[in-house]
């Protein structure tokens, strides 16, 4: 199985060093889109051309270079904007995780400029990633929303099959694993069983943890499992699932890209089933 936590070489940080590296990773967002050099070589280390120190956040060091993120009002000369999802598809694992961290830090900073308790403007803290209200003392940390992903498999007449589904907002022909957010007071296992039952009406067993991935749309932590069908017929949840079905491995629909945890989970589970891992 592929291990997604390929963060070797990254050291997280909050306080910027007194003498930052001459080149650095600068992840700058304009209205939610990532700035990239117009030359088309993707995100590369750059000299510090974004010196709005009061508005930017230090993230740490990647490959010995300092990393920063901030907002900008518009793309400066020589730069263009690109949607974060499209940009991440071109990144290797360490840079993808850095972009995910940057996007979530900027979303937290945007959403917590004012205290959610009393409405007072908040203040950034120097020693931790937090914004504190000077009036009532309420502290807001970056929000993380855990979400479960379940890839259900079975053997039907001797053939391995995957249960895949599509939501109404998927592009035509595109299917993925099931997913849903963990509710307050709910365990991961209970969430997985509930979401599968709600979305497609089947029961599962043999939960096997696969991997996790930070997903910055806007602040999710995806926890992926494969699990075996234990009974029940597919019954799509109205408004949530447009269509779901069992697919043979040689007749699969359009699948998620490999950079996402859904793509990794499906690809590796297909290989596992083809190798007879479920029969071991």
Image (cartoon, rainbow, N blue to C red):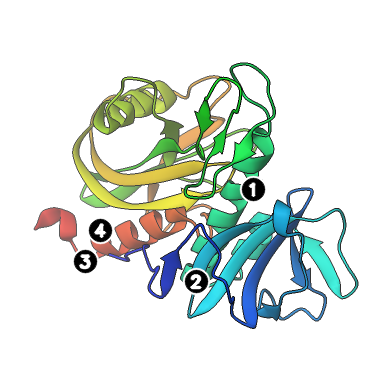
Where 158 falls versus 47 (above or below)?
above
Residue that carries the numbered disc 2 in the rendered image: 61
Sequence-first tag of 2 and 4: 2
Q: Alpha-carbon distance for marks 1 and 4?
A: 40 Å
Callouts 3 and 4 close, C-beta under 8 Å: yes
Residue 64 visible? The answer is: yes
Q: Position of residue 261 (x, y in %)?
A: 43, 54
Residue marked by disc 3: 275
Mark 2 or 1 closer to N-term?
Answer: 2
Q: Nearer the viewer, mark 1 or mark 4?
A: 1
Q: Residues within 10 Å of mark 3 (few under 14, many from 20)?
A: few
219 to the left or right of 31? left
Residue that extends furthest to the left in the rendered view of this protein:
280
In this rendering, would 169 be left or right of 138? Answer: right
- To which residue does mark 1 refer? 106
User: SS class of the residue under badge 1?
Assistant: helix
Q: Quadrant of residue 88?
A: bottom right
In space, the residues marked 3 and 2 are separated at their CA atoms by: 40 Å
Label 4 sits on residue: 273
Disc 1 crowd, CA 10 A, few/some/many (<14, 14-19, 20+) = many
């Amino acid at each position: 199985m592929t291990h997604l936590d390929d963060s070797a070489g990254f050291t997280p940080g909050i306080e910027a060093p007194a003498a930052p590296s001459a080149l650095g990773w600068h992840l700058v967002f304009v209205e939610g889109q990532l700035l990239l050099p117009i030359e088309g070589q993707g995100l590369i280390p750059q000299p510090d051309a974004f010196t709005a120190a009061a508005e930017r956040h230090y993230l740490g060091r990647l490959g010995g270079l300092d990393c920063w993120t901030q907002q900008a009002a518009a793309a400066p000369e020589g730069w263009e904007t690109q949607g974060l999802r499209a940009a991440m598809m071109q990144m290797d694992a360490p840079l993808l995780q850095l972009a995910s961290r940057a996007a979530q830090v900027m979303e937290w900073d945007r959403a917590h400029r004012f205290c959610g308790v009393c409405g007072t403007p908040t203040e950034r803290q120097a020693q931790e990633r937090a914004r504190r209200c000077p009036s009532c003392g309420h502290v807001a940390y970056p929000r993380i929303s855990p979400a479960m992903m379940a890839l259900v498999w079975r053997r039907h007449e001797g053939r391995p099959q995957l249960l895949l589904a599509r939501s109404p907002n998927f592009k035509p022909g595109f299917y993925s694993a099931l997913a849903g957010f963990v509710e307050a007071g709910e365990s991961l296992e209970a969430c997985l069983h509930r979401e599968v039952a709600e979305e497609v009406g089947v029961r599962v067993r043999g939960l096997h943890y696969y991997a996790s991935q930070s997903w910055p749309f806007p602040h999710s932590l995806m926890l992926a499992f494969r699990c075996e069908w234990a009974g029940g017929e597919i019954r799509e949840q109205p408004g949530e699932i447009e269509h779901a079905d069992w697919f043979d491995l040689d007749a699969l629909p359009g699948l998620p890209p490999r950079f996402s945890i859904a793509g990794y989970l499906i690809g590796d589970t297909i290989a596992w089933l083809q190798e007879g891992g479920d029969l071991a």
